[in-house]
Image (spheres, helix red, strand yellow):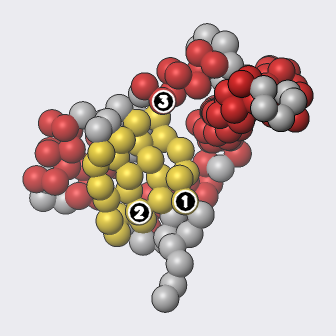
Amino acid sequence: MKRINEYKKLFEVEKEIDLKALKTKYRNLVKEWHPDKFQEGDEKKEEAEVQSRRIIDGYHFLVSIAPETKEANKEEYDQSILSGILDFQHNGLVLEITFVDGATYEYFGVTKPIFQKMINANKLNRFAKRSIFPNYLYRKSKRELQEA
């Protein structure tokens, strides 16, 4: 959640993420902080490189959780959650679930007690379908599992 709020603050997003407005703000920030704008040896050049990476990461992250993106990928997401859970891990407030079809999604704001309930549930998929999938903000985090 901290990461989401940090990026929303950077792009001055109040509530819902509007892709058109986000893209405009992204372009303006990239122009402002592009490292090529600064001379070699300028102390601002290093700061601009860090800021530029932060802007790019933030843009891609916010696009991935935008309602328009989620709606466009809803069919694929529904297929993934129906395939069943292959693996999962919890780190801070982020639950990462890898599905049998190879897709991996991150769910934000999942607390330790909810994660414990998930681990202790008799039917993992059933618990996740009722308590995780509909209640938490998510994004696709990895393309597909690589086969060895």
Task: State whether residue 22 appears in this view.
Answer: no
The reply to whether callout 1 and callout 2 are in contact (CB within 8 Å) is: yes
Q: CA distance from mark 3 to mark 2?
A: 21 Å
What label sits on residue 142 in the rendered view? 1
Residue 39, horizontal then vertical, whole percent: 87, 30
Residue 128, horizontal then vertical, whole percent: 30, 49
Three-letter amino acid code at the position of disc 3: Arg
Residue 84 position (above or below residue 78): below
Q: Return the disc, 1 or 3, that comes first in the chain's sequence.
A: 3
Callout 2 secondary element: strand
Disc number lying in front (3 or 2): 3
Asked where in the image residue 17 lies, by quadrant, the reply is top right
- The answer to which of 103 and 45 lies nearer the viewer is 45
What label sits on residue 98 in the rendered view? 2
- The residue located at (43%, 25%) in the rendering is 2
- The answer to which of 110 and 51 lies nearer the viewer is 51
Three-letter amino acid code at the position of disc 2: Thr
| Left or right of residue 76, residue 105 in this image | left
Q: CA distance from mark 1 to mark 2?
A: 9 Å
Asked where in the image residue 133 lies, by quadrant, the reply is top left
- The residue located at (31%, 36%) in the rendering is 93
Residue 146 position (above or below residue 2): below
Three-letter amino acid code at the position of disc 1: Lys
Quarter the N terminus occupies: top left
Q: Residue furthest bottom?
A: 148
What label sits on residue 3 in the rendered view? 3
Residue 144, horizontal then vertical, whole percent: 56, 69
Q: CA distance from mark 1 to mark 3?
A: 18 Å
Task: State whether residue 113 appears in this view.
Answer: yes
How many neighbours does mark 3 have within 10 angstroms: few (below 14), some (14-19), or many (20 or more)? few
- The residue located at (14%, 44%) in the rendering is 117
Q: Return the disc, 3 or 2, that comes first in the chain's sequence.
A: 3
